[in-house]
Amino acid sequence: MKYTREIKVGVLAIICVFLLFYGFNFLKGVNIFSPTNSYHGVYTNLHGLEEQASVFIMGHKVGQVDRLHYDFTKDSAFTVDISIRKDIVLPEGTSLALRADGLLGGMALELLFPEDATEKLQQQALIAHGATLPTVYLPGIVENLQNELIAKIANAVEQVDTLVAQLNGQLEGDHLKSTLANVDRISGDLTDVSGDLRRIMNTQVPGIVNNADTAIANLNTVIADIKAADLKATVARVDTAIGGVNAVIADVRAQKGTLGQLIYNKSLYNHVDATVISADSLLTDIKAHPKRYVHFSVFGKKDK
């Protein structure tokens, strides 16, 4: 019983160290009770990949980056050690892709299975523990946008250079000089037209305005005279005259009066026509033999 307290303190210290170790690995996403398989990948550029970064398969986390080695004497300077769950088997042709972990996150690794992964798994064509996987780099959304933006900017710069070159060619040629000469001539013509317009405004327009004022005054006078005239009485007299004419026309249509009888009574028309013919014959005979109707003679001799 002499060392009971020391034993308790030692056991408690061991438990605390274990819990600290377990908690630290748990926070890193490592389950120390779960067996893992280790694999390796070689890169020329890590693009900010760090230890403890996640390893995914189809978006599901299956492991992490354990360690990063670098040897700058080689072209592919970086070697990445990863560990994944032991229940995850990798068919032959699986590659280790370095990609962005989210839009604003760091970098992560993605295990990409080949297209015939199912067939190879059935044939037990698997990658052994500790093997080195082929690696690829997958640009993220931001990097793709950056590359597209840089390409568009470069294209725009080329177009601007072309435009500037064409403008310089125009400036160095005679086309711009002729254009400026035409502009100068047009400006002179506009100056002359402006002077003529100013002269017309100063000389002719006042007379036209005075004539217009006189015409307006005369028109006002005529309108005043029309207003002053007894237009209603005149219209009434015209209406009365038209009414009388309409009455006469109605009597004529009703065969009333002499004019109606003359127009619509054929016998009266024939009688009048015969009378006119007889009168015409009588006048003709009087002109031919006036002595038959006028008995006047100095000597009393009668012409038979």
Image (cartoon, rainbow, N blue to C red):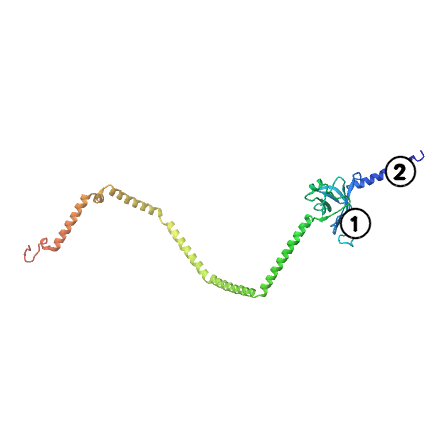
The residue sitting at the top extreme is 1
Instruction: Provide the residue designation for mark 2.
Output: 10
**Vertical arrangement, residue 41 with respect to residue 11, above or below:** below
**Vertical arrangement, residue 171 with respect to residue 226, above or below:** below
Residue type at tag 1: His
Instruction: Provide the residue designation for mark 1.
Output: 69
Q: Quadrant of the N terminus?
A: top right
Which residue occupies the foreground of this view, 200 or 10?
10
Rendering coords of residue 150 (x, y %):
66, 54
Which residue occupies the foreground of this view, 94 or 266?
94
Rendering coords of residue 77 (x, y %):
77, 52
Q: Would residue 236 appear left or right of 214 to someone viewing this image? A: left
**Vertical arrangement, residue 212 with respect to residue 64, above or below:** below
Q: Secondary structure at mark 1?
A: strand
Rendering coords of residue 96 (x, y %):
73, 46
- Label for residue 30? none
Image quadrant where residue 15 sits: top right
Rendering coords of residue 211 (x, y %):
42, 58
Which residue occupies the foreground of this view, 184 or 245?
184
